[in-house]
Image (cartoon, rainbow, N blue to C red):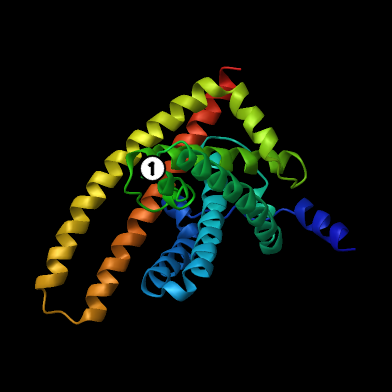
Amino acid sequence: MTVALRQQLRQQAFPNVSFGPFRFFEAMPWLVLAASMRVIAFNNPLIAIPAIIFASIAVLHAFLVVTQRSIELAQGQTSLGALTFTEQSRLTRAILWRIGLLMIGATTAIAAAGYTSVAPHLMQGLDGMAFDQFGDIGKFWSAVVALLTLLMIVDAEQNRGRVSFRRAVEELARRSLWLGVAVIALGVIYLGLGFGQGLIRNALWQFYQASLLHPLIKNLIFFVFIFSFAMLRLWVTLLVLTWGLKRSYLRG
């Protein structure tokens, strides 16, 4: 009965609601939650791991929302907007554990190869889609993780919600030229964003130490700074990757 009702509702004509130039702001609540969890993890080591897991889930939810809007901007069609919250949660959890195993495997392999200073940055691959990484290699790794996440979302939509890491890798291999260009371009953009964010961060830190404002206000300013760059980074990530994916389809 529920399935029949949902099919009936989909057949009805509804007004086309759009956020216009603010369409990506639908991801804002999830990024606010992710930024909050990061602050909690930093200030309270006892609950750092659960807070980081919740932050990762929130980042993936935000990624899913922006994926829908990016595909629509690229004149593509997607049914991601028809997913219920439960279906979205199921999809993000299925992607999260696969990406988590990928990051653990990559970190372990790099550490075993002797690059112990680089290995920890690979565990931030998912986090780096929205928040700054301090390692240059980690920024390009985050671009790869973001691409695989996008490919898994697109593939799951075509396969009744079934997530497959293998199919995503096969799709990456088939479209390696344009997707590779997109990953390199996104990694370079991450470098530029990281440089600009670092300059602003240092300026805010100087202000934080010298200002006589109430600590709550200064913390709020710093939080808005983190959140704003997270939103910008996620927008840019999906716009670049969907551009690369669209070019790969156009070029066959």
Q: Secondary structure at mark 1?
A: loop
Residue in the picture at 23% in, 47% down: 196
Most distant residue in the top direction: 251
Q: How many marks?
A: 1
Q: Which residue is mark 1?
A: 118
Estimate the x, y position of residue 105 in percent, counting from the top left.
57, 43
State the quadrant of the C terminus.
top right
Quarter placement of the N terminus: bottom right
The answer to whether residue 179 is above or below residue 72 is above
Q: Nearer the viewer, residue 113 or 135?
A: 113
Q: Nearer the viewer, residue 196 or 56?
A: 56
Q: Is residue 72 left or right of residue 123?
A: right
Residue lying at the far left in this picture: please name it.
210
Among the 4 quarters of the image, the one containing residue 84: bottom right
Is residue 210 toward the left or the right of residue 100 in the image? left
Q: Is residue 189 above or below residue 228?
A: above
How far across and how far down the image is residue 131, in percent? 38, 53
Residue plotted at (13% across, 71% down):
209
Q: Nearer the viewer, residue 106 or 158?
A: 106
Neighbourhood count class around disc 1 (C-alpha, 10 Å): few under 14, some 14–19, many 20 upward: some
Residue 54 rendering spot, x and y as whole percentages = 54, 65
Residue 28: image x %, image y %? 45, 61
Task: State the residue in front, 138 or 128.
Answer: 138
- The correct choice, above or below, for 222 with respect to 157 in the image is below
Please state which amino acid type lies under the numbered disc 1: Val
**x 26%, y 80%: residue:** 216
Q: Residue at coordinates 19% horizontally, 82% vertically from top-left?
A: 214
Residue 86 sits in quarter: bottom right
